[in-house]
Image: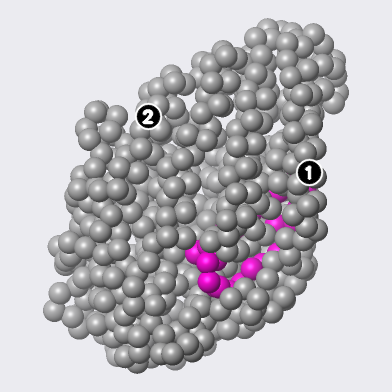
Amino acid sequence: MKTKNIHYVWPAAGALGLAFAVATQAQDVPKLRQRSDIETSYKWRLEDIYASDKAWEADVARLEALLPRMTECRGTLDDSAGKLLEALRARDEVGELTDKLLVYAFMRRDEDTRSSVYQAMGERMQRLTTQVGEAVAFMNPEILEIADETLDRFLGGEPALALYRHALDDIRRRREHTLDTEKEELLAMAGELVRAPSNVYTLFNNADIKYGTMKDDTGADVELTKGLFARFLESPDRRVRREAFEKMNGAYAALNNTLGALMGANIKKDIFLYRARRYGSSLEASLDRDRIPVSVYTNLVEAVNSNLDPLHRYAALRKRILGVDTLRVYDLFAPLVPEEKVDLPYDQAVKTVTEGLAPLGEEYLRPFRDGLTAGWIDVFETEGKRAGAYSWGSYSTHPYVLLNHNNTLTDQFTIAHEMGHAMHTYFTREGQPYVYSDYSTFVAEVASTTNEALLIKHLLKEEMPKSRRMYLINYYLEQIRGTFYTQVLFAEFELRAHEAAEKGEPVTGDALNTLYRDIYQKYYGPVLVIDKVGEVAWSRVPHFYNSYYVFQYATSYAAATSMARRIADGGAPAAKGYIEFLKSGGSEYPVELLQRSGVDLASPKPVEDTIALFASLVDEMEKLAAER
């Protein structure tokens, strides 16, 4: 049973979405605030989904009562158009309710990942989701047993079935990869096992792992958190950067064998599934869900590997500006103009983001502004809260956004990013029925990254001192590096790790460390020195447990760069066309949907244009640095 995508930004250095930590004094060690300390206006309103856990329980019972309806539909799909329509509507009803129950349970858990009550609710929903998957598993194989001429006759004779034409065509497209009913049910029963590596990592990474204490910029002892780690990597004090880097990565390095085995289990899961469904590789199996050609992925990796010189130049420029004898990984995130670093409280950041999105017009901005004050967003880090940022929700709820705002420029862009996802969800829900509300991540990241591109364009239009422009140009470079180059690096790491496993090579912590180091070195060139403890950084990336996900950040960045330029240059008609794109949801395949919107990711041009943009920004940064 597929549920609506959750759109993440994770707290790994080099990506967007750094988390927030507010200190309160308890002896000499700052502590995170409790959730009860946060004003209601800065917390999301999950009561809009269910007024209480008791109401949630009532809907769990309702879902359990609905499942026998699916059983009653079994064996009837080819009886008539009416029977097929009845089954499809029943599946939609079950799916919509499952989504609603799931997001409530998991977002309650994410408010405090230590809560055994909400951990149990999340586990219960995973079990129930598996049961739902089992209950509907017969449908695709049974639809495929309907002769094409019969199905076409059903579609022509029952107007209400026309809604499902694209969905039915998609099922028929994957005929050779769909198993018989008994085997599909068996795969559905394995759902909890399939999700086990991701679930184990999520609890470990958010509830269990500790990084110890360190001395901050003032020399005070602080407990290192993911949120503070991100901030400390931006410190002008190299001792702080180094200590945070070594403490954070050291905690993962101490468990390298275990984390290697866990990632190995995740990769083996992917191998099992692609073989069970008769694909040629795990990559092909993953991309075929959205009919994305394998060449889109491999061409992306190849194009970047063929154009690494701008990134090498940027690493050398960074070393020169920072004035370090040896450039190390923890030097890649320090602002090159630290005196221009600004404090951006949440309300101020929201105001600037809204101004930056003005080219999208009132059709976009009206619900955007409403969402900011309507219980969509959970703003600040509190003890036990899930790290990072994401957008989620279900078809029957408004969108939700989890933040961990830390008053940085990065956090301002995270607001734009996650609200881009939220607005995509909002417009899709307005424009599409449930069956097409689960739009592909391949296009979802376009919505978030277009917002970021419009924001940086807005900031760079202002008159400013040279030092301020240098700061923003560097930030723009970091956006491209984090959202484009880093994600391609991650994508290549994932691909090579899977390819090795598919050849029968062992997947261990040491093997993954070596692979990660070699690829990282290739991307940044000989100027960068990678310390031993930095080799384990792959194990800090939760997205690797959602296999072949991260490449879409890079393709989306390339597409969003084109979209933002069209909107900025084209005025109201371009903005209207973009909103129509957002309203399309999953009603078309993503590559074709983007092509219809004027962006062709099957060609190398959007990727090459992004690399050219990065190179031009490096040129400007070199010039600004020389004039200082």
What coloring was used for the rendering?
Answer: one colour
Residue 565 inside the magenta-drawn segment: no
Residue under label 2, please give it: 271
Please state if 620 lies on the left or on the right of 105 as rendered: left
Please state if 271 lies on the left or on the right of 345 as rendered: left
Q: How many numbered circles are shown?
A: 2
Residue at 59% of width from left, 40% of height from top?
126
Q: Is residue 192 above or below residue 13?
A: above
Q: Which secondary structure is most common in the magenta stretch?
A: loop
Return the mark for residue 330: none
Q: Is residue 516 visible?
A: no
Residue 62, quarter of picture: top right
From the viewer's perspective, is the residue at label 2 or at label 1 nearer? 1
Q: Residue 80 location in percent, x, y?
A: 82, 11
- Please report whichever mark, 2 or 1, sits nearer to the chain's N-terminal start: 1
Residue 154, quarter of picture: top right
Question: Which type of secondary structure does the marked residue at label 1 adopt?
Answer: helix
Q: Residue 463 location in percent, x, y?
A: 52, 87
> What kind of residue is marked 1?
Asp
Report crowding for label 2: few under 14, some 14 to 19, many 20 or more residues within 10 A (C-alpha).
many
Residue at 60% of width from left, 33% of height from top?
130
Question: Which type of secondary structure does the marked residue at label 2 adopt?
Answer: helix
- Is 100 or 561 nearer to us in this picture? 100
Q: Is residue 96 above or below residue 185?
A: below
Residue at 66% of width from left, 14% of height from top?
142
Q: CA distance from mark 2 to mark 1?
A: 36 Å
Which stretch is magenta? 376-399
Quarter of the figure that contains the C terminus: bottom left
Residue under label 1, please give it: 59
Q: Residue 271 location in percent, x, y?
A: 37, 29
> What kind of residue is marked 2?
Ile
Q: Residue 159 location in percent, x, y?
A: 86, 23
